[in-house]
Image (spheres, rainbow, N blue to C red):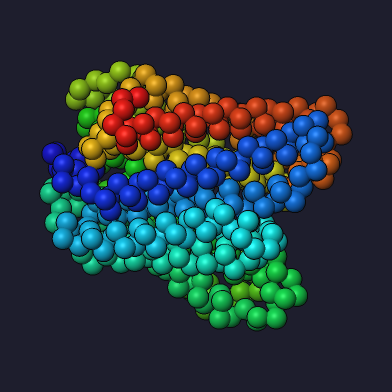
């Protein structure tokens, strides 16, 4: 491989139970998230939401959907990449971590049926107040941090300078996740236990506010890895050297060192603490991602070493991911008040990361013992998912300009005029199209896992 190839070397012997299992866990979380997202979309659409009284179900579904489609999906994919970096003799321990994390994911998914249905729609890691849900979170976190520990201590040697840079980026992403875990412990010890009994929603909001912001840095570092890996798969000559790539990852991680300082200087229950953590993420989380996006846009518009067809899945995944990244970031600066502009912002960001991971999955599956997936079908799926997501995000942003409140459904939204209803119809239509695109993705990749060409 070239020194400027930013990818992990994959050999036939890497198609192990641990590697494939972590990828399957990540994909399985999307199955669970997809099953509940349909309820969420329909519960927000005019007329349809009047047919069934599902306000309570909407909130419970939203908790499970967010945790599966963000926390479990992103961190399981991180576990997949981490396992690829582990020395072969240590991967048997990654299987143990996988088993623990999988148990946790199952408990999170089915917790609404295993205990009290009391949803708290706090930011980042919303929760259900029942023991099965918290057991699921604990098991999943234990499995993830176990595989992350193995990856940080039992790494195989890098094959070239570009892979070494990717290893560094992966190291920073996992290290930031450990810092988020430490801040979770800090928040737990600092918050009075009486607060949970008095106001559970406020308690969990404060508990996960700091760690939740830090996890966004982990996700962004992983996204940058996926971006450059996809560009490398397209045989592009990068204008960035491995050393420059390492500097970029260092810049992406540097702002997270400010989080413990914020914890030291400010009370967790104070408005200043929440504002400081928000500003840290808003202005710090783009230090690597924004230059990376600009570099890649410049790179992929240049003549490549071996020109690829425009419909190449890796190219489409990268381009659509960059578009959603730009859109989500722009909407973030338009947020005023607590309305659906906020989910428009983070849906753009989340879909951007998901698209990068989808493209990387298409690229890696044949190298991990799966069947090759038809470029035509993979491209159709990416277009369907991306265009649906764009409509969904734009519809939410438009509704936000009308003051439609977030985390509401049915009559609670106050959709009285055509001007209020039209953007929510666009949101719903886009959401349904995106769900169909997500289903097609899962059909293609699970078919490839079974050895069937898509």
Image coordinates of residue 432 in percent, x first then y, are: 61, 30
Horizontal and vertical percent position of residue 3: 15, 42
Location of the C terminus by quadrant is top left
Residue at the spot 67% in from the left edge and 31% down from the top edge: 428
- The answer to whether residue 428 is left or right of residue 369 is right
The residue depicted at 59 percent of the width and 68 percent of the height is: 131
Total numbered circles: 0
Q: Is residue 447 above or below residue 33?
A: above
Q: In terms of depth relative to the viewer, which is nearer, 113 or 420?
A: 113
Q: Is residue 78 visible?
A: yes
Image side of residue 357 versus residue 341, left or right: left
* Residue pictured at 43% horizontal, 31% vertical: 443
Q: Position of residue 358 (x, y in %)?
A: 40, 37
The image shows residue 438 at horizontal and vertical percentages of: 49, 33
- Which image quarter: residue 115? bottom right
In the rendered view, would you say 113 is above or below 188? above
| Above or below 429: residue 269 | below
Identified at 52% across, 59% down, the residue is 107
**Residue that sits furthest to the front in the current view:** 114
272 vs 349, left or right, is right
Image quadrant holding the N terminus, namely: top left
**Residue 265 shows in the view:** no
Indicate left or right for 65 with 1 as reference. Answer: right
């Amino acid at each position: 491989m070239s020194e400027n190839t930013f990818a992990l070397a994959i050999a036939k012997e890497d198609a192990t139970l641990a590697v494939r299992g972590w990828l399957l866990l990540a994909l399985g979380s999307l199955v669970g998230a997809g099953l509940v997202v349909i309820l969420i979309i329909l519960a927000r659409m005019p007329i349809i939401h009047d047919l069934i009284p599902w306000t309570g179900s909407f909130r419970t579904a939203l908790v499970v959907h967010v945790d599966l489609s963000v926390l479990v999906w992103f961190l399981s994919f991180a576990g997949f990449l981490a396992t690829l970096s582990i020395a072969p003799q240590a991967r048997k321990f990654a299987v143990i971590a996988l088993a623990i994390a999988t148990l946790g994911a199952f408990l999170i998914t089915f917790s609404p049926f295993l205990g009290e249905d009391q949803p708290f729609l706090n930011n980042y890691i919303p929760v259900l107040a029942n023991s099965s849900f918290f057991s699921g979170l604990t098991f999943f976190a234990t499995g993830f941090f176990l595989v992350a520990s193995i990856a940080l201590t039992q790494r195989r040697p890098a094959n070239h300078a570009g892979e070494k840079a990717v290893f560094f980026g992966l190291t920073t992403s996992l290290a930031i996740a450990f810092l988020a875990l430490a801040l979770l412990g800090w928040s737990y010890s600092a918050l009075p236990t009486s607060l949970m009994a008095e106001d559970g929603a406020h308690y969990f909001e404060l508990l996960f506010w700091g760690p939740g912001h830090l996890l966004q840095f982990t996700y962004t570092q992983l996204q940058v890895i996926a971006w450059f890996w996809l560009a490398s798969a397209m045989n592009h000559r990068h204008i960035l050297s491995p050393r420059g790539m390492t500097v970029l990852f260092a810049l992406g991680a540097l702002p997270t060192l400010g989080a413990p300082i914020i914890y030291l200087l400010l009370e967790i229950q104070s408005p200043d603490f929440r504002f400081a953590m928000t500003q840290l993420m808003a202005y710090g989380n783009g230090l690597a991602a924004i230059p990376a996006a600009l570099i890649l846009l410049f790179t992929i518009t240049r003549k490549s070493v071996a020109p690829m067809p425009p419909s190449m899945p890796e190219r489409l995944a990268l381009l659509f991911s960059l578009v959603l990244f730009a859109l989500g970031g722009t909407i973030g600066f338009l947020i005023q008040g607590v309305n659906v502009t906020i989910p428009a912002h983070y849906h753009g960001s989340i879909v951007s990361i998901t698209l990068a991971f989808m493209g990387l999955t298409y690229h890696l599956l044949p190298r991990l013992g799966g069947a090759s997936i038809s470029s035509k079908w993979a491209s159709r799926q990416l277009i369907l998912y991306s265009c649906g997501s764009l409509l969904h995000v734009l519809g939410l942003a438009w509704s936000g300009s009308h003051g439609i409140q977030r985390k509401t459904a049915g009559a609670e939204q106050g959709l009285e005029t055509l001007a209020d209803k039209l953007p929510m119809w666009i949101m719903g239509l886009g959401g349904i199209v995106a769900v169909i695109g997500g289903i097609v993705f899962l059909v293609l990749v699970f078919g490839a896992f079974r050895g069937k060409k898509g």
